[in-house]
Image (tube, helix red, strand yellow):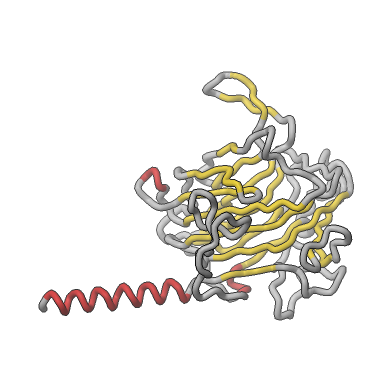
Amino acid sequence: MNIKCILSIFITIMIMFFITTVSHAWTIDMDFNQGPLGRSVEDKGNSYPVFSDAAGGTVYSDCAGISQDGQCAKMNINKGYDGWGTWGGRLNFNERGVSNPVVGTEVWISVKLFMPEGFDYSAIPWLKFLRLHTTSSGKSNEGYNDLYITTIGEKYYDSVLKKNLLQPPFFFIKEQQDLLKRFGDINLDNPVTGIWETYEVYLKMDYRSVTTGGTSRVRIWKNGKLLAEFNDIQTLNSAISQADSFLIFTYWNGGKPDGSGAVPTKDQFLFIDDLIITTDKPARRDISGNPMIGDVLIVPNSPINLQIN
């Protein structure tokens, strides 16, 4: 076989690989503008995306006085309750007809969040926020890629400095790897009530981190500002692991099923809008040139093969 023939076969294989990769890229875009006001965002049988479950207290809202582009989703939580099944929501990827992220997949998750003034996000120990669930090929639980919001004023013991320090606003952890990453400036990056804020997470799925010769890494932005990049996170457990679902909030740590928890400290609610999950590389870039969904600084050409599910 001559060199030209080998080169031709190689080029053909690479083209087929590229086409296959692009064809499997997908986007779930939930703007909450189409659902009937007051109805659960779990309501099935519609052409627009809804939560699979765990969203019993999440309803379509007109967002009176704070609306950006029509409707949004209102999430309710009651004093002392953990809110399991009602606080937040879950998206099972197979229900949306999209492929589970596997080794090599890039995932971007973005959401706009509005906490009304006076909203108390104290939790024991911390408030679950954006969560990508992973499993083995046999569907056994392999933990979450978890972004948490910490409680203002909480302290932790720094084993290097050998003293107590104020907890930064956020931390990230991949369960079962259990490498806890605190981040954010306590003077600049705490969640702000009374305004819309945008949060975004990027995950490169791999069982080997960048620091160990693989590709797995995590980036987290708030309002377009890159707060953290972690190159030692293992987003998957093995070469045949996958992510099967996304959850927002899920349940309130420290709350109780019978409402006897010390938190939440009161009946309250917040709003979310423009929840986007995509494996199709966004066209937008942050100030460092990293692809991202929101709060643009540079806008290159539009991405190819953008699918709205």
Compared to residue 257, the image places residue 101 above or below, namely: below
**Residue furthest toward the top?**
162
User: How many circles with numbers are drawn on the protein?
Assistant: 0
Going 77% across and 71% down the picture, which residue do you hit? Answer: 33
Q: Is residue 129 above or below residue 241?
A: above
Q: Quadrant of the N terminus?
A: bottom left
Residue 115 is left or right of residue 140, and the answer is right
Q: Position of residue 176 (x, y in %)?
A: 52, 46
Q: Foreground residue, 37 or 86?
A: 37
Residue at far left of view: 2
The residue at the point 65 percent across, 65 percent down is 91
Whether residue 139 is visible to the viewer of this picture, yes or no, is no
Q: Quadrant of residue 161?
A: top right
The image position of residue 22, as x and y in percent, is 45, 73
Nearest the viewer among 178 and 41 is 41
**Percent of width and height locating residue 112:** 71, 56
Does the rendering let one see residue 11? Answer: yes
Compared across the picture, whether 75 is left or right of 218 comes to: right
Task: Please name whichever residue, 266 or 175, is drawn nearer the observer in this view of the structure.
Answer: 266
The reply, left or right, for residue 159 in relation to residue 46 is left
Q: Which residue occupies the foreground of this view, 129 or 191?
A: 191
Q: In screen coordinates, is 227 left or right of 22?
A: right
